[in-house]
Amino acid sequence: MTRSRRLTDVGRVLEAAEADSPLEAVSGVARELGLAFDAVAVSFLIADLSGRALVRLAHVPVTGHPGSLSTGERRDDEESATVLPFDGGPEEQAVRTQTAQVLPPHGAETDPDLAGLWRILAPVTERGESIGLLELYLPVEPERDVVAEVSQVAHLLAFVVIANRRHTDLFEWGQRSRPFSLSAEIQQRLLPEARTCEAAAFTVAGWLEPAASIGGDTFDYSLARDLLHLSLTDAMGHGVDAALSATTCVGGLRGARRRGMSLLDQAMVANEALFEHAVSAAGEDFVTGLIGRVELSSGALEIVNAGHVVPYLLRGPALTALDLRVDLPFGMFADTTYGSTTVTLEPGDRVVFLTDGMLERNVSSIDIAGALKANADLHPRELVRALADSALAAAGHALEDDATVLCLDWHGLRDESRASVSGADPSRASSPLT
C-alpha cells in the first residue's frame, strides 16, 4: 500500500460528500475512504438510539422477490437496517474505549468474500459523541500509521454524517429499532442533538430511557462563551399532555437563555409560560426541574431547584447530595419566585442530575449511591447508559416513568486545549470491558 493511494486531501472527501444526494453521501465517502486504503469492503455502522447496539444501513434495490431478511434486519422499500447488539465484542470495545480495533482474519465471516481479511473498526465520533463506527476490511495487516490515518478519516466521516442527516430521515429511521409514539416523537425533538459534549473544562452527557407511556422528561445543555447551561425537567403526567407541557417548559427556558437572561429570569419565564398554558388548556400542568449554569472561568455552578430530586456530587471517594434551596415546580402559581444555590466545583468533580423515574418503587432496588461510586471511572457517556440499564433491569423492562440522567464532569481546564484524538479525549474514555 503506497501513501499516494491514501486519502490525504480533505477536498476529495468534501467532493464525494457533495457529489451524492444526502442519502448516499455517507456511503459515497465511505467508498472513497475504502479506495484510499485499498480496502476490499467498507461500511458505516450508526449508533442505535437505544445506545445498546449499532446498525448497518444498506441500500437494497428490490428486483423481483425481495428475499428473506437476515437476523435483526428490517426494511422499508429499498432501505435495509440490521441491528448488531452490543455483546462485549470489538464493536462495543471500540465505542467504549474510543480506540480503533484491529482484528486478524478468523475465518468465521458470514460473507465468504471477507474471509482471510484484516478488519479495522474505527470510532466515528465528534466531541465525545459516539455516532458510530467505520469498518474496513483489508487484505494485509495494517501498519500502525495506517490505523492512525483510518481513525482520522473516521473522525472526518462524523462531520459528513452530522451535515447530511439534517436533510433526510434515513439515518434516524435506521437508528430506531423500536417504534415511536406521538408523545415520544415530541419528546425526542426536545433533546439536544448530541447527547454528549467534551470540552477542555468539562464533559457532559445525558440519557433518557422512556417509559411505555412517555413521562415528559427532558434534559438539555448549551455552551456559551463563558457559561455552560444545563437543565433536567420532569413534566407531570404521561403521554401527549406531558410532552406538550415539557415542550412549553423547554421552549421557555431556551428562549430566555437565548435572550441572555439570568438563571432566575429563565426560571420565571418557564414558570409563567407553563402557568399560562395550564390556564388556556383548563388543566393543572406543572414541571419539576433543575436548571443550572457553570461559570467556566471559576467553576461556580448556580442551580435553581423547582421541586425536583436533589442532584449528587461525587468528589473523590465522597458522594453527597447537594444542599439546595427548593422552590415550587414550574407552572403551579403565576407569582412563584425562585432563588438559587451556588456550588463551587473543583477539578475532578462529578455532578449527577436524575429524574424520579430513577427512584420510584418499581426501580427502588437500584443502589444509586453505590452505582455512582462503583462506576466513577466510566466516561459520562457510559455512566448515564449504565444507570438507565440498571433502571430497565430493575423494572423488568417495563418502566412506569421515564428514567433520565444528566452527568457533568468538571475538569477546570478552560484555558488549555482539549487533548482530542479523532473526536474523543482518550484520557477520559472508559476502560475496556473485561
Image: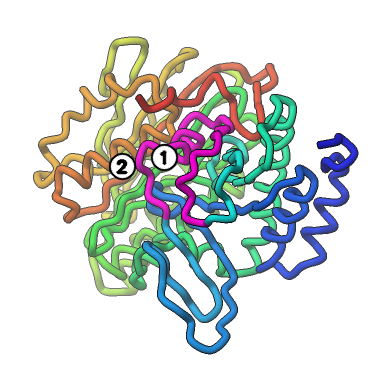
From the viewer's perspective, tell me whether residue 304 is left or right of residue 121. left
Q: Amino acid at mark 1?
A: Ile
**Of 221 and 139, which appears nearest the observer?**
139
From the viewer's perspective, tell me whether residue 63 is left or right of residue 386. right
Disc 1 versus disc 2: distance between alpha carbons? 8 Å
Q: Position of residue 191 (x, y in %)?
A: 46, 53
- Res. 252 in view: no
State the mark number for residue 306: 2
Q: Position of residue 60 (x, y in %)?
A: 57, 74
**Of 174 and 260, which appears nearest the observer?**
174
Q: Is residue 135 above or below residue 180?
A: above
Find out whether residue 97 is within the magenta segment. yes
How many labels, in total?
2
Q: Is residue 73 above or below residue 344?
A: below
Q: Position of residue 173 (x, y in %)?
A: 49, 67
Q: Position of residue 19 (x, y in %)?
A: 82, 65
**SS state under label 2:** strand
**Of 344 and 106, which appears nearest the observer?**
106
- Res. 119 in view: yes
**Residue linked to disc 1:** 291
State the mark number for residue 21: none
Residue range in magenta is 84-111
Q: Earlier in the sequence, mark 1 or mark 2?
A: 1
Q: Residue furthest right?
A: 4
**SS state under label 1:** strand
Quarter of the picture containing the N terminus is top right
Mark 1, Cα crowd under 10 Å, few <14 / some 14-19 / many 20+, is many
Tell me whether the residue at label 1 lies in contact with that at label 2, contact meaning CB atoms closer than 8 angstroms: yes
Residue at 56 percent across and 69 percent down: it is: 169
Residue at 29 percent across and 29 percent down: it is: 325
Q: Amino acid at mark 2?
A: Ala
Q: Is residue 360 above or below residue 102?
A: below
